[in-house]
Image (cartoon, helix red, strand yellow):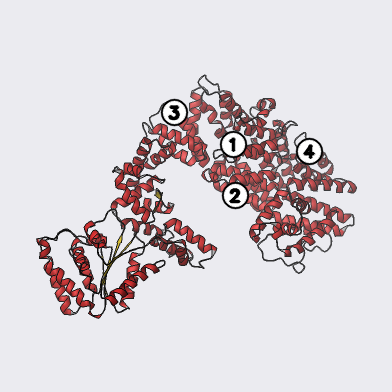
Amino acid sequence: MLVQQEEQITRLRRVFHACEEQQRGHVALVTGAVGSGKTSLLESFGEWTAGSRGQVMSATGSRAERGLHLGVVRQLFHSARLAPEAAAHVEKLLRDATSAVPLPEVGGEASDGDRAWAPLLHGLFTTLIDLTANGPLVLLVDDVHHADPASLHCLLYVTRRLRHARIMVVFAEASTLRPPHPLFRAELLSQPHFSRISLPPLTVDAVARLVEGAVDDADTRRTAEHYVRMTGGNPLLTRALLDERAGSEGSDHDLPSVGDAFDQAVLGCLYRHEPGVRRVAQALAVLDRPASTELLGHLLDVMPATTVPAVRVLRTSGLMESDQLRHSRILHSILADMSADERRGLHQRAAEVLHDRGAEASVVAEHLVAAGSTVAGWRVPVLQDAAGHALSSGRPDVAAACLRLLASAPVDERQRTATTEMLVNARWQLNPLTVNGQLTELVQTARDAGWSTDASLSAVPYLLWQGRVDEAAEAVSGFSADEEQAPATPGRLRIMQLLVSLSHPDHLASVRQTPATWSRAAGAPTTVSPLLQAVTVLGTALTPTADNDTVPTAEQILQRHHTDDGALGLLTAPLLALLWAGRSDQAAVWGDVLLDRPVVQHAPGWRAVIRAIRAEAALRVGDLPGAEHHARAALEDMPAPAWGVAIAGPLSTLIASATESGRFAEADRWLAHPTPPGMFRTPLGLHYLAARGRHHLAVRRPHAATTDLRRCGELMRTWGIDAAGLVPWRLELARVQLSVGNKTQAMQLLQEQLRVPHGVDDRTRGRTLRLLATTAAHDHRRKLLSEAVNLLQSSGDRLELVRALGDTGQTLQRAGDSARARLLVRRAYQLAQDCGASVLAQRLIRREPGSGLPAYPAAAELQEPDDGLSDAERRVAALAAHGHTNRQISSKLFITVSTVEQHLTRVYRKLDVKRRTDLPSRLVVYAETLADETQSATS
């Protein structure tokens, strides 16, 4: 790798020419970090010299051969093309030198031993002079810092006599902790014809030249900048990254796995240095944070000053930046090279040193966990504090690791119970199946204490999740606070009472039926517990009244706490409240916000719950592919057996999504999935019953559908929870009655649905009016359908909007307005395709008045460009390019304003524009077609 070495090569060539022309020798010292390209520079210069009427002799020092007497000198002369007589003479001189008295210190004062070596030194120098007869002679010695003392003595003898000799000596040395031969180096630097050549780190421009692609290309530049950040410009490490990049571009499985080259390069740098450098690097890797030389000294149990040279060497090599290792890959390479005992020992020592220096509990605990040592003394409170901080920061994985160490710690009963509470909390967020043992222990402890401890309330949410509602109700009903408990205990008890009553409405009905005692907490100031506010707003969604503003309150809680790392569990309640209050579109938006938070990656339990809610929200806004995707992802995050009674959530969404998509066999497979018996006594169980009822109706089993839906109604009326956002059972039952021709019963159910006090959201009202229109006279039908279209458009349910538009088209056709009917059905067809409801789209085509041709314009009428836009995105972009506002586009395409904004964001990114005025003019033709169709259909 000779990139960025042009200047150094030029300097060496200039010296060579001066040596040739002026009959004068020269000494050059090439310095640089390990892996900086010194060897490449010497090899390149040697090849050039050989082609420029010069003769080259080369050798390389080695740490392993430092004790090999005259090893470097032998390499030099073996590399020369000596005549047989000269070679024999040199060999005799070297052989005789082995029996000579030991040399004095390299560069030291003369002694009798030095005079004994005079024949060898003079003979070798004479041989070198003879070699200059046909041109300059160049001696190249790489890694001179590893050369044996005898060879250095000989080389120093030569450098003193270069004034009138055509000999050029080039040494290369790497940065070391300390010069191994300080006197040799001092005399070398004092020579009159001496030059020092440094090899700096590679720049971004230099690395860009090595990366395939144009230097000024943006991608090439970004790659080069990334490589320099990782390597500090070290050529050896950079070459390793380039090799990995080349290997990853192929698909041949026989290639080395990506990462090996860089790992080996990092270790190559370290092992070419002294052990002290490697030891400091290991300490930095274990600490994994900025560390002063003082901290490193205490960690390694050495004087802090002794770590200063090692830090300097690591920085020069590009492995370290400022006070820490430069990149996580360097850190992992170093850790992988250490044995398990080495790592544990350093982690244990790091925990002790950091604790003594007053480091945060979470930092110290990290090393205690990695060391895996016995916990006692000061380690107990450190791990407890760290576990609590981890839970509040959204890191249940870290908390669980700390708490596992505490399991065997010698603590009192109160501390052990507190540890078990936190362990259940942490493990549930990772995998609810793993908490059974600790949960049983927690319940037994609470029962033995007469339900008077905090453990009684701590166990309630997890018991409810598993369907152990009787035990949860026993814990809440039997709880009696003692004088030593915190003032917040009454509020916590109220939360758990409400949680039992809402999740399993058969129990503690009196709590739910007296909303005055808790509903005011939803909109209370921030002094009220956020968890109480969250559970309360869920209660107002299930038991709506005229005084409760469920939707704004839920959004307020989400807005206030969505950036809190430890608030995922709290936020599922207002998210579910939005769904059950009929604002599925807002639930979808907030679900995406929460899923985009980095903290969800560490809590698969809560991530699965949020995805399940997001899936149901997608289903209710007509996004069938999105509903299936999120529901399947929820089951991947948390296995089905771990869901407990909440398995009804993702299963009901998958059943309904498959049914709406016409995949009935797939829906049957989801229905065959095992479910816990207690599931049907929960609000989520009603979702399941409704989804199963819709499936029964779709496969022409109206009697079975009626049974499920009537059961829904009986449960909701018994519980006093008759919110249509939960399950509009009357509407669904009316659909069944219409399918069997019982319009009178259907009309009664639909009118009753509309009369439910405070429990009918816009989506349910729109769906109800659409069905009611099928029972109304022709003149009243169009009015009902028009209102239904407006309500469904505002609520964001595109799938039900498709049905309403299709019904409107049919009504127009029967009134003799075939042209407007056809245009409206086209719009319905487009929406159905966007929703992934191909079966419904085909049904629209089959019943479209006229020829039965697809509702879309034929390809010959309108050629769609290959711009990467979906049909929905192109329609929005077309109207935006034509000058329509977001609200106007929303009205024309029967979608919400937020959906328009999302489509435009993706359009700008795909077309690489920043504003609507930059949209291509070719899109206007689509806008004109859409505008004509919409105007005609809705006028």
Placement of the N terminus among the 4 image quadrants: bottom left
Q: Amino acid at mark 4?
A: Gln
Residue at horizontal 84%, vertical 41%? 744
Q: Which residue is mark 3?
A: 415
Q: Which residue is mark 4?
A: 753
Q: Is residue 894 left or right of residue 393?
A: right
Residue corresponding to mark 1: 570
* Residue at the spot 74% in from the left edge and 45% down from the top edge: 795
Q: Is residue 771 left or right of residue 439?
A: right
Chain-order first, disc 1 or disc 3: 3
Give the x, y percent position of residue 548: 72, 32
Q: Is label 1 in a helix, a strand or a loop?
A: helix
Question: Are the residues at dot 3 and dot 4 in contact (C-beta closer than 8 Å)?
Answer: no
Picture coordinates of residue 262, whole percent (x, y): 40, 59
The kind of residue on which mark 2 rests is Arg
409 lies above or below 211 = above
Label whose residue precedes the other's in the sequence (4 or 1): 1
Q: Residues within 10 Å of mark 4 (few under 14, many from 20)?
A: many
Q: Which picture quadrant has residue 733? A: top right
- Helix, strand or loop at label 2? It is helix
Look at discs 2 and 1 and give the one toward the viewer: 1
Q: Amino acid at mark 3?
A: Gln
| Quarter of the image where the C terminus is located | bottom right
- Looking at marks 2 and 1 on the same chain, the residue that comes earlier in the sequence is marked by 1
Mark 4: secondary structure: helix
